[in-house]
């Protein structure tokens, strides 16, 4: 995992294989773990969980769909 990521088991599921099976590279997995290791200030998704659409409640289950506020350090 990236040195910047929080050292916690909350994002271990990112490396469990399901995302790799969807075509995520190791770099994508590291980025996903880093982004998901902190809560989203926009939708209030907790650390370790995907963001949700604040209008529909739809789960935004992809790295590219995470809120910008969460992706920015």
Image (tube, grey):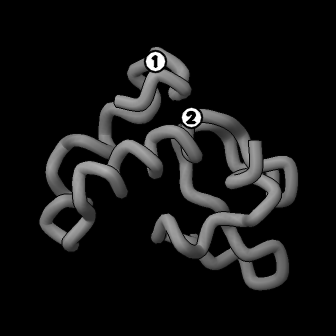
**Dividing the image into 4 quarters, which one contains the N terminus?**
top left
Mark closest to the chain's N terminus, 2 or 1: 1
**Residue marked by disc 1:** 8
Question: In the picture provided, is 72 more to the left or to the right than 42?
Answer: left
Q: For the residue carrying disc 2, how many other residues have a C-alpha within 10 Å: few (<14), some (14-19), or many (20+)?
A: many
**Dividing the image into 4 quarters, which one contains the C terminus?**
top right
Furthest residue to the bottom? 56
Question: In the picture provided, is 25 more to the left or to the right than 8?
Answer: left
> Which mark, residue 37?
2
Query: What is the C-alpha distance between the residues marked 2 and 1?
Result: 8 Å
Above/below status of 72 relative to 58: above
Q: Position of residue 52 (x, y in %)?
A: 68, 67
Furthest residue to the top? 7
- Mark 2 in CB contact with mark 1 (< 8 angstroms): yes
The answer to which of 17 and 64 lies nearer the viewer is 64
Secondary-structure class at tag 1: loop
């Amino acid at each position: 995992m990236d040195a910047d990521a929080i050292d916690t088991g909350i994002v271990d599921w990112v490396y469990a294989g399901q995302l790799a099976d969807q075509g995520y590279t190791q770099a994508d997995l590291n980025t996903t773990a880093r982004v998901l290791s902190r809560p989203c200030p926009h939708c209030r998704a907790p650390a370790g969980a995907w963001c949700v659409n604040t209008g529909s409640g739809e789960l935004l289950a992809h790295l590219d769909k995470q809120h910008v506020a969460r992706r920015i350090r």
